[in-house]
Image (cartoon, rainbow, N blue to C red):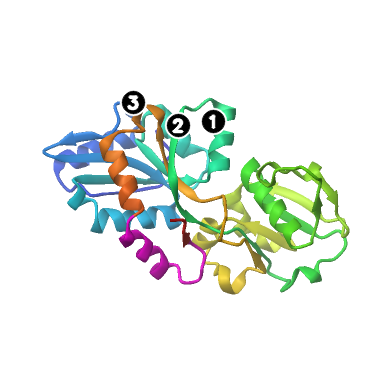
Amino acid sequence: MTHISRRTTLLASGAGLAALALAACGAGGNEGPTEENGVTTIRIGASPAPHAQILTFVKDNLAEGAGLALEISEYTDYQLPNQALNDGDLDANFYQTPAFLEGQMSEKGYDFHAFEGVHVEPLGVYSETLTSLDELQDGDEVAIANDPTNRGRGLDLLAANGVITLADGVAPTSATTGDIAENPKNLQFTELEAAQIPRSLADFAIAVVNGNYALEAGLNPSEEAIVIEEGEGNPNANMMVVRTADAENEALVKLDELLHSDEVRAFIEETYTDGSVIPAF
């Protein structure tokens, strides 16, 4: 079985329900989006928030007029959407940054194509006990993500705010705890699955949380984050990804155009007024 936690679909017909059941059982294939009666169905995987929320807006307001139907599968694990795309269970996914994708392709040999960034989800530092990074004590424990890209972003955020210093020449998105040159408060770093970190705040003095997982956990970045990444010039915009063989598929190109439409920009700006999600176009 494909690991799918929840699915929404444009299709209400019996044929649509049958296709849903087939996809849920992992009956994939690499044929790409399928067209029937002038409507092209795209199976796309996404993190629940904000990616699936943005896709649902497109599904409800823009897709039909563009001749598209979206089947949206929600994933809470960062590894599964790329595997599902590679296996043919999805036609596209929408949940990752360029650096994360690069790491996945290098590590696992995926042959993927990324479209331009749609939005940025700034990382934030959160705590249940501290209100300032100045309150950190010697030996305090810090939670960071265990995947290479978000671990590096988290360490870079801490370095940018004077908590640690990274060695010269280390790329922010590839930094590890071994690249920490100065750690004046002898902080202890624990690496966790990114999705688990919001549920573990009580176990740490501070924790670096991805924007989408902060949203899912009910955290308000603008009010509750001690510090947060800057949005301007941020190289970590999330984008839609497809198999390279489908890079010029007309339906997928059209969906990417919808994701970069004025309507989607307005939806992002009006929905995430706390600054947790900002347009990247």
Quarter of the image that includes the C terminus: bottom left
Q: Earlier in the sequence, mark 2 or mark 3?
A: 3
- Of 5 and 104, nearer the camera is 104
Label 3: which secondary element: loop
Identified by mark 2, the residue type is Phe
Which residue shows up at 35% across the image and 52% down it?
Answer: 259
Q: Earlier in the sequence, mark 1 or mark 2?
A: 1
Residue 261, numbered label: none
Which residue shows up at 57% across the image and 50% down it?
Answer: 235
Q: Earlier in the sequence, mark 1 or mark 3?
A: 3
Residue 112, numbered label: 2
- Mark 2 or 3, closer to the camera: 2
**Is 217 covered by the magenta stretch?**
no
- Of 97 and 52, nearer the camera is 97
Please determine whether, in this image, residue 8 is positioned above or below residue 127. above
Q: Residues within 10 Å of mark 2 (few under 14, many from 20)?
A: many
Q: What is the magenta range? A: 261-277
Image side of residue 38 versus residue 4, left or right: left
Identified by mark 3, the residue type is Asn
State the image coordinates of residue 12 (x, y, percent, origin top left).
17, 48
Mark 1–mark 2 CB contact (< 8 Å)? yes
- Mark 1 or 3, closer to the camera: 1
Label 2: which secondary element: strand
Residue 105, numbered label: 1
Which residue shows up at 34% across the image and 35% down it?
Answer: 91
Gap in Å between the C-alphas at discs 2 and 3? 13 Å
Q: Residues within 10 Å of mark 1 (few under 14, many from 20)?
A: some
Q: Residues within 10 Å of mark 3 (few under 14, many from 20)?
A: some
Residue wearing tag 3: 30
